[in-house]
Image (cartoon, rainbow, N blue to C red):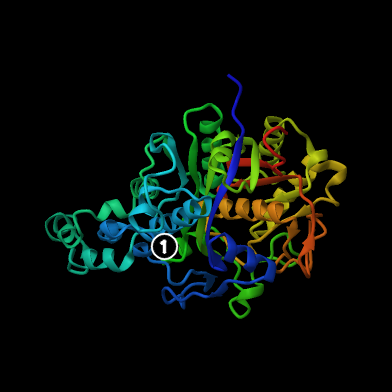
Amino acid sequence: MSERRVVITGLGPVSPIGCGASEFWTALLEGRNGIRTIQAFDPARFGSRIGGEIAGIKARDFVPKSYRKAGKIMARDIVLAVAAAHYAVTDAGLHTRCIIERGEAEGEPNLDVTRFGANIGAAAICADLSELSEALASATEDGRFSLRRWGREGMGNLTPLWLLKFLPNMLACHVTIVHDAQGPSNTITCGEASSHLAIGEAYRSIQRGTADVCICGGAESKANPMALIRQELAQRLSVRNDAPQSACRPFGAGRDGTVISEGGGLVVLEALEHATARGVRIYAELVGFGASNDAYAPSQFDPQGRGIALAMNKALADAGTNADAIDLVAPFGCGIPARDLAEAKAIRAVLADRAAEVPVLAIKGGLGNNGAGSGAIDFIAAVLAMHNATLPPTVNGESVDPDCGVTLSTGDPIDARIDVALSSAYALTGGQNAALVIRRYRGQDS
C-alpha cells in the first residue's frame, strides 16, 4: 500500500503575541513584541528578569463544563496545551466531544475518534513553588529539612493528586480525554526538538494508515522561577533588562542570549482523502520528516551544526526534493551566540550557494524561547507564511551577524510565493535535532 498524503488543516498557536491562528498571524505581520519584565513572580534576584508571558489563559475556557474540576490538577504547561488543542480543532472544523459538549457544534463527531491520534511534546514540568514550599516548611526540624517529618507531615500538605499536575505525559492525557482522541498517542520529551519530533511521529502514523487525524505539537512554560534559574545557570539568557523588547536577537550582531517564555502550539494533521471528504480548508501539505542525534558529547552542542544539517537533509530526502526547491527556512533561532552560529552553519551547509538568497523566518525576537513548544510555534509561522504568500518582518532582525550569513526579512511584510519550506529545531542541551518539509498544497492530483 502506498503511503498516504498528509495535509495541515488546523493551527492552534498559543503565544505571548497572540493566541489562535488569526490573531497570531496578525501579530507577526505587525511585528508585535511580547517580551516584558516578568510579572508572574518577582524576578528581582535573577540576572535576567525578562520574558514572554500569556495573560488570561484559563483551562475552564477550553474544556466542557463537566471537565472544569480537572483544572485543579493542570500545571501551566497542561493548560497551554489544552488551550492550543481547542484552537487547533476549532480551526480545523473538527466536531470533537469537547466542541459538541460546549455547544460549539451540533450532532455527532465528524471523525472516527478511534482513528484520532495525539502526539505532544512536553518538558520536565516545573513544580508550583508556592504549593511545594508550604509542604517543605512543615517538614523542617531545627531549621533543616527532615525526611522523617516529610513522610509524616510534609506530604500531608500536598493534594493526593499533586504529582498528576507535573507528569509530562499529562499534556497528551488531558487533550485526548477532552477531545476523545482514541487513536495512537505518545509524549515526546526531547527539549526544544520535542514539537518537531511529535509532529513527525504524527505524520508517520497517518502515512502508514494507523490514524486518519492527529493533533500534534507541544507546549511548555518557562515563566517560573525554577525554569528561569536553570536557563540562567546554563548561561543562555540575555540580561538586557532595561530594554526587554530588543533583548532577543536571533542571528543578530551583538546578541547575548535568549529570553524565557511560555506557550506552544498544536496542529491538526489529516490524511488528504479524509480532509477533502470533509471539504475543509487545507493550509499546506507536510511532505518530509527527518531526525538526527549529534552523538557529539554529553550535554554539549556540536559547534558546526552537523546534526541539524543531517536532520534537514533527511527531511528533504524523505520529501523527495533537494535544497534547490527551498523557498523559506524556519529555524530555531533563539539568540544564543554559539547556538545561532552553529545553526547558521547548518543552514549554509544545506543550502550551499543559495544560502544568501533564501529568506529565514526567525520569530523568537518577539516571543522568546518556551522550550518544548517553541518548535510548534515556528512551524505554524512557516505554514501561515506559505498559506498567505507573505513573509512577516523579523523582530530585532535589523542587524544580522555577518558570521551567520543568513537573510532575515525586515520592515514591512513582503509578498512571497512559497512552494517549499523547511522548518527545523534542536534541543539546547545538544543531541536531538528534527526537521519538517512543508509544501504548498496544489490539489489532490498533484
Q: Quadrant of the N terminus?
A: top right
Extreme residue in the top direction = 1
User: Which one is in front, 23 or 40?
Assistant: 23
Report whether residue 249 is seen: yes
Q: Position of residue 343 (x, y in %)?
A: 70, 49
Q: Position of residue 27 (x, y in %)?
A: 63, 68
From the viewer's perspective, tell me whether residue 100 is left or right of residue 53. Answer: left
Q: Residue at x 42, y 77 (%)?
A: 42
Q: Residue at x 62, y 72 (%)?
A: 33
* The image quarter in which residue 148 lies: bottom left
Extreme residue in the right direction = 353
Report whether residue 298 is seen: no
Q: Crowding at label 1, few (<14), some or many (≥20) Cα neighbours within 10 Å? A: some
Extreme residue in the bottom direction = 242
From the viewer's perspective, tell me whether residue 191 is left or right of residue 149. Answer: right
The total number of labels drawn is 1
Q: Position of residue 50 (x, y in %)?
A: 54, 73
311 in relation to 49, above or below: above
* The image quarter in which residue 56 lies: bottom left
The amino acid type, in three-letter code, at marker 1 is Met
Q: Residue at x 55, y 38 (%)?
A: 277
- Which element carries disc 1, helix, strand or loop? helix
Q: Position of residue 307 (x, y in %)?
A: 66, 39
Extreme residue in the front direction = 107
The residue under label 1 is 226
User: Which one is in front, 205 or 311?
Assistant: 205
Q: Quadrant of the C terminus?
A: top right
* The image quarter in which residue 337 lies: bottom right
